[in-house]
Image (cartoon, helix red, strand yellow):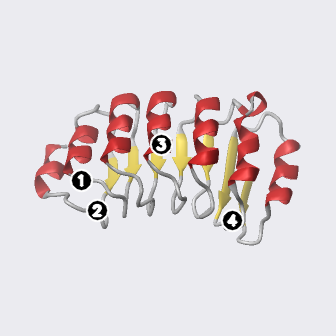
Amino acid sequence: ISLRSEFLKDFELIKLIQQVPNLKALEIVSAEKITDACLSSLANEEYSRLTRLNIGGCTQITDKSTVPIIKNCPSIYHLDFDMCQITDATIIAVGQNCKMLKYLSCTGCDKVTDVGIIAIATGCKKLETLLVDSCDVTEDAIVAIAESGPSLNTINLKNTNDVTDLSVAIH
């Protein structure tokens, strides 16, 4: 399912999701009215085959729904949390559960810190792309990611604090 609408409401998305019990990909970009109450429905066994989740711009989404979804969907390889209200709790859950992760974007998630990104470095050895623009990450997280494995080929660090040329040069 791929939707891009700032007017989409919880009950409309729930109705759509219920019609696709073997959902593998969900993209609901800039759906600012979607809440945790709606997305929490993905945290049940029926949706455990989910491999792609893009909820970028869904500014009301928090750890309350993302952590259970991540724990229920270990096959996820593509995650976009841009501008969501997530914290390290979600990112740690990703590092612990999504071993096949290749793409992670948490641009604008200013509560994502080194703690979460280091969990990604530890658990997601197949990561190819990491976008952490405007996150609260420092050189420590970037060095951990750079040293975590050979798969990483793209990292975006715009508007990050305390990242120097040294951490970028290591990779």
Q: Position of residue 124 (x, y in %)?
A: 41, 32
Front residue of 55/114: it is 114
Q: Residue 2: which disc?
A: none
> Secondary structure beneath disc 4?
loop
Earlier in the chain: of badge 4 and badge 3, it is 4
Earlier in the chain: of badge 2 and badge 1, it is 1
Q: For residue 143, what is the image quadrant?
A: top left
Judge left or right: residue 21 versus residue 29. right
According to the picture, the residue beneath numbered tag 2 turns out to be 160
User: Residue at horizontal 70%, vertical 58%?
Assistant: 35
Q: Position of residue 45 (x, y in %)?
A: 75, 27
CA gap, disc 2 to disc 1?
A: 7 Å
User: Residue at horizontal 69%, vertical 30%?
Assistant: 49
Q: Position of residue 108 (x, y in %)?
A: 44, 63
User: Residue at horizontal 51%, vertical 53%?
Assistant: 86
Amino acid tagged 4: Ala
Judge left or right: residue 35 versus residue 128. right
According to the picture, the residue beneath numbered tag 3 turns out to be 89
Q: Residues within 10 Å of mark 2 (few under 14, many from 20)?
A: some
Amino acid tagged 1: Thr
> Secondary structure beneath disc 3?
helix
Front residue of 109/74: it is 109
According to the picture, the residue beneath numbered tag 4 turns out to be 31
CA gap, disc 1 to disc 4?
A: 30 Å
